[in-house]
Image: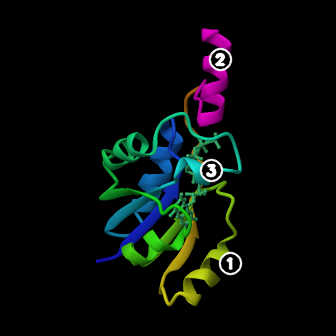
Amino acid sequence: MTTVVAQGTFDLLHPGHLHYLREAAEMGEELHVIVARRENVTHKDPPILPNEQRREMVAALDPVEAAVVGHDDDIFVPVERIDPDVLVLGYDQHHDRGDIADALAERGIDCVVKRASQYEPDYEGAVLSTGRIVERILDQRQ
Ligand SMILES: Cc1cc2nc3c(=O)[nH]c(=O)nc-3n(C[C@H](O)[C@H](O)[C@H](O)COP(=O)(O)O)c2cc1C
Ligand SMILES: Nc1ncnc2c1ncn2[C@@H]1O[C@H](COP(=O)(O)OP(=O)(O)OP(=O)(O)O)[C@@H](O)[C@H]1O
């Protein structure tokens, strides 16, 4: 069984998330997703929605076998538990492939690290970023 792992904040879900998870799922037979804990999202505004709600929504998506809320301080704990064959980084995820690959090897996790592509929809007006969805809400609902 080829197990794939993906990860992210997944606050307000949008087609970019679906694209990422579909592409990751295609790289193996079972896709497991690690959902970032709010307190660990420090590289941008923290998510609006609680950890468990974000996990529940991701777990319900068709390409996803299972979703877990990530560890509170060691990001590799859930990866070790899942023991994936493939780890897929999002197209703009702020992690270096080589660094992640080295960290996995140090932990004896035999796993290739790949990067997904960006979603380019064939329709106008898509809002494919949680941050930009929030901005639009603030513009239109204030
Ligand atoms: C291999 C890997 C494992 C991760 N595990 C965890 C974790 O256990 N707990 C957590 O809160 N975040 C974890 N994350 C961190 C978030 O998922 C990470 O910040 C992610 O890149 C979210 O950023 P994004 O939503 O901007 O893509 C992990 C990230 C990677 C690349
Ligand atoms: N438009 C997109 N195309 C492909 N992948 C995407 C797209 N948007 C997000 N992703 C991927 O989904 C994962 C989770 O993204 P995240 O939860 O950070 O949402 P986001 O919309 O990127 O948030 P923000 O834009 O506010 O940073 C990341 O790995 C990211 O690369």
Element carrying mark 2: helix
Q: Work out which quarter of the rendered image holds the N terminus and state it.
A: bottom left
Mark 1 or 2: the one toward you: 2
Task: Name which residue type carries label 2.
Answer: Leu
Which residue is nearer to you in this view: 78 or 85? Answer: 78
Which residue is nearer to you in this view: 33 or 113? Answer: 33
Q: Earlier in the sequence, mark 2 or mark 3?
A: 3
Q: Are marks 1 and 3 in contact (CB under 8 Å)?
A: no
Name which residue lies at 65% across and 30% down: 132
Element carrying mark 3: loop
Q: Ligand 1 falls in which quarter? A: bottom right
Q: Label 2: few (<14), some or many (≥20) within 10 Å? A: few
Mark 1 or 3: the one toward you: 3
Which residue is nearer to you in this view: 29 or 93? Answer: 93
Q: Earlier in the sequence, mark 1 or mark 2?
A: 1
Q: Is residue 79 magenta?
A: no
CB at disc 1 and ligand 1 closer than 8 Å: no
Which residue does the numbered mark 1 point to in the structure image?
A: 98
Q: Are marks 1 and 2 in contact (CB under 8 Å)?
A: no
Q: Position of residue 66 (x, y in %)?
A: 31, 58
Prevailing secondary structure class for the magenta stretch in the rendered image: helix
Task: Name which residue type carries label 3.
Answer: Val
Could you tell me how far apart the alpha carbons at marks 1 and 2 are, in whole angstroms?
Answer: 38 Å
Name which residue lies at 70% across and 69% down: 96
Q: Which residues are the magenta region? A: 125-142
Q: Is residue 4 left or right of residue 129?
A: left
Task: Name which residue type carries label 1.
Answer: Gly
Element carrying mark 1: helix
Which residue does the numbered mark 2 point to in the structure image?
A: 138
Which residue does the numbered mark 3 point to in the structure image?
A: 41
